[in-house]
Amino acid sequence: MNRLIERVESHNYRDLFLKDLHWSAPTHRQPIALTTDEGETITATNVSSYRGVSVWVCDQQPGSTLEAQLDQLIAKKSVDRLIIFHDETEQTWRWPVRRSVGGSTTTRLSSHRHTTGQENPNFAHRLQSIQIDWKQPPDATGLIAQVREAFDVEAQNETRQASKLMARMYTSLEACGTPEHDISVSLARILFLMFGDDTDMWQAGLFQRFIARHTRPDASNLADRLNELFTWLDTTDRDRGEPPEHLRGFKYVNGGIFNEPISLPALKPEFRDAVLEACQRDWATVSPAIFGSMFQSVRDAKTRRDLGEHYTSEENILKTLNPLFLDELRADFELAKSKTNEKLALNRLRDRLGEIRFLDPACGCGNFIIIAYRELRELELQIMERLQEITGDHPLLLANLGLKVNLDNFYGIEIDEWPAKIAETAMFLTDRQADLKLIERLGWAPDRLPIQRQATIISGVSALRIDWKSILEPSDKVAIAGNPPFLGISLRSDEQKRELQDVWGGRYHGTLDYVTGWHAKCLDYFREFDGRWAFVTTNSITQGEAVAPLFEPILQEGWKIKFAHRSFRWTSEAAGQAAVHCVIIGFTKGRNKPRLFDYATPTSPPEEQSNVTNISPYLTDGPNILVTQSSKPLNPQMGEVIYGNKPTDGGNLVVEVEDVETVRSEKTAARFLRRYIGARELLHGGERYCLWLPEMQPEDERVSPVLRERLAGVRKFRSESKAASTREAASTPHLFRQISQPSTPYLCIPAHVSEARPYFLASRYSPDVITSNANFLTADDDGFVFAIISSLMFMTWQRTVGGRIKSDLRFNKLLTWNTFPLPHMSAATRAAIVLRGRYIVHAREQQPELSLAELYDPSRISNELLHAHHELDREVDRAFGINGENATELDRQRNLFSRYEKLSAAKK
């Protein structure tokens, strides 16, 4: 049985939270008791707490009414609480879901039940998800988010349903012939109105009653009513006059949400039904951060691909914002509480919050600015609560000082209008949710209607074509973060290429991903200032040839990597999310201690590395080294790699399987038939042959019909080429266009290998086997080079500095082979490594039916082959001076870059 479930079923909740989930000791010593009308006493005891979140246990299940009453008593002691009601056979875990109704905040209890002895893997997973990792302990907001994620399933369902319903409304408006611009404006407005119904902007359910009572079931007057309502919401009280009955209660909104006149076309009953169903959701519990996934669910895949859109999960947004600036502010809050003049320190910190300006220059539906605003408002609220606690002042005295964190401190740039409209609206809704917390915890909130302040979202223009300084004046107080479009070289349009060329100017390099245009803009924007910036990007910017042209100007202008998340699998809030491997890199000119987060696997949780002194452009702990192409190997023992043999023959010198018997049946032609290895044959097996004719005599062609026919085909093909050098080669049709075949055993290296392989794949062949130019080759008489390329040290170097084709590893002789910092090998070390390489060949030969790719399929690789590789790695690691038994990828990279730095310096 799962140990966590075992604790639950034995009702040992204290040990469950303290020993297994690593929470802290309880903070409330006295139990809380409720006496029922019948005189029965129901008691709850605090068994564990962590940063304001408390766990209470009641050894009864008195029913939902009494449970709610007991929860209200506990709420006076514990705003954020998890309550466990249990008897001998069942437990009910309850978490309060908050909602604002009629000017006050109410809660209802979500419910999760577990029956003793009943298998419940989902429940065990919920418990695991609230375990505290003391290497990276969450703050109060983070823990509340963890518990809510685990137990507030009602809110999760509300969020999912909300997204689906908005997609339905979009589809219905589209079917009615509504222009896309008007769809985006209308849905943003309806979203605002439904949210207003549930957050006490006006009388609860006002908009829902407007649709239900004042529009016809056949929707014949729905468009006219909505057009009228939209105009009314943009009409000041002074200009309104006496409102008609159906508009009574709707306040003047102002701001940019309703001020543009639009005219909806005739709508259908399906749209009215979708609106009414959506109105029944509890929009107060829906996170505005999900609107990006809502947007993605209604956009076709081609549009998303063309724009390079990827919607970032809240988890990944916080991976960016926390180390960029939020963690420092939270630490300063804790420090301020220890100061002698705590009030002064807290007020200064609060002033600093108000000075921060945040820009997302690829904001989409606003997820980054939404989360940044929400977190800063939460921190300001914590400061205000602490000020009230230490001063005893009435909350209204704090209110007179005004809020420091305001919407107009937040900015976004978005090329597409529809997500920009969602971002504008979502920011206001986030502001309202933050105000509800003010009401709940301090008893007041500012009156937001009519809207006086709002975020600045610029739409309709590419962020690479607009001057960011015209939107937000640069200063040291500006933080920039976001998730710019991911578009590789093959996907970007001609216009996007021109944008890159313009922003990079003379520093433009053809290997740069479209996302790097945002890095160039940050360099220009912050040229005279010490701001901070961070982007979520594909991991391609830290691989291959693109690393040097991107990071060289960044480093030259004094920027350092403030923090980085090494490669991880990107996740979106949307369904059908793309499989993208990302990195997050933040930059500063300050002297902050760098923070590096690593992932055991692409889907593992991040682990912060200790004692990091500097983060390199390859996201390793080490100096800022940039690996550049080398024309010769740093260590001559590696041997020089060249391309294989290129036929340029129109298919006449290559013999396919179906033609082999014809060639073999002719005595003269059969003498020149050789096994031929292309990329497919090397990795996936299969037979293929070629005619290898360097030693052919003129007499051979005269007596062989096969040779005459095929060489005539080569002459014709080459003579018709547009390339002069190829036409010249028509005079020697019996020779491959380029010949590189060695006279000794050689190593055949594929140009691309799947990233899923644990080792880089290559094989040795005798000189009578001809390799095509789809592969690389190098002389390898004794198998030493085979052993080196088969080692984990080489694979680490390949993954770190090599480029990719899609996700496949791309072998580059100038960048990954010639730069590999192999130490000089003594004769004895070389012999030991060669021997271990032979063991690998022997292990492969035990499964002759499998191709090379099949042998190294992670799901089926044999123990014998793995053991042989481990033995080889032990020898190679020893040569590099590391203990491979416990070495991590970061350890290997640290060693490799240190050696590269020394060897490359010695070559200069």
Image (cartoon, rainbow, N blue to C red):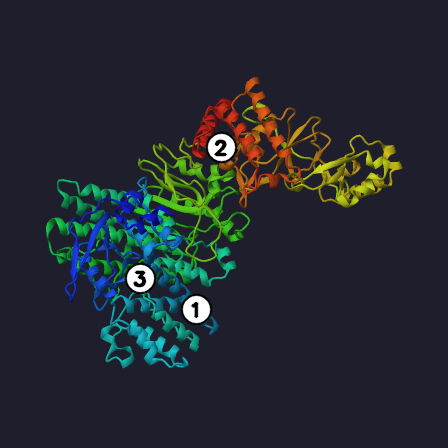
Nearest to viewer (mark 2 / mark 1): 1
Tell me how far mark 2 sits from mark 1, CA to CA: 51 Å
**Residue 893 falls in image quadrant:** top left
Q: Position of residue 218 (x, y in %)?
A: 41, 81
Q: Using the image as rendered, state which of residue 144 and residue 270 is in the foreground.
A: 144
- Relative side of 392 to 62, left or right: left
Between 761 and 904, the one nearer to me in the picture: 761
Q: Residues within 10 Å of mark 3 (few under 14, many from 20)?
A: many
Residue that mark 1 sits on: 168
Say if mark 2 contacts mark 1, CB within 8 Å: no
Tell me the CA gap for discs 3 and 2: 50 Å
| Labels 3, 2: front one | 3
- Within 10 Å of the Cα at label 1, are there few (<14), some (14-19), or many (20+) other Cα atoms? many
Q: Amino acid at mark 1?
A: Arg
Report helix, strand or loop for mark 2. loop
Residue 906: image location, x then y, percent: 49, 22
Task: Kindly identify the amino acid type of the residue bearing the numbered disc 3.
Answer: Thr
Horizontal arrangement in the rendering, residue 281 relative to residue 696 (left or right): left
In the rendered structure, which amino acid carries the disc numbered 2?
Val
* Residue marked by disc 2: 627
Frontmost residue, 683 versus 227: 683
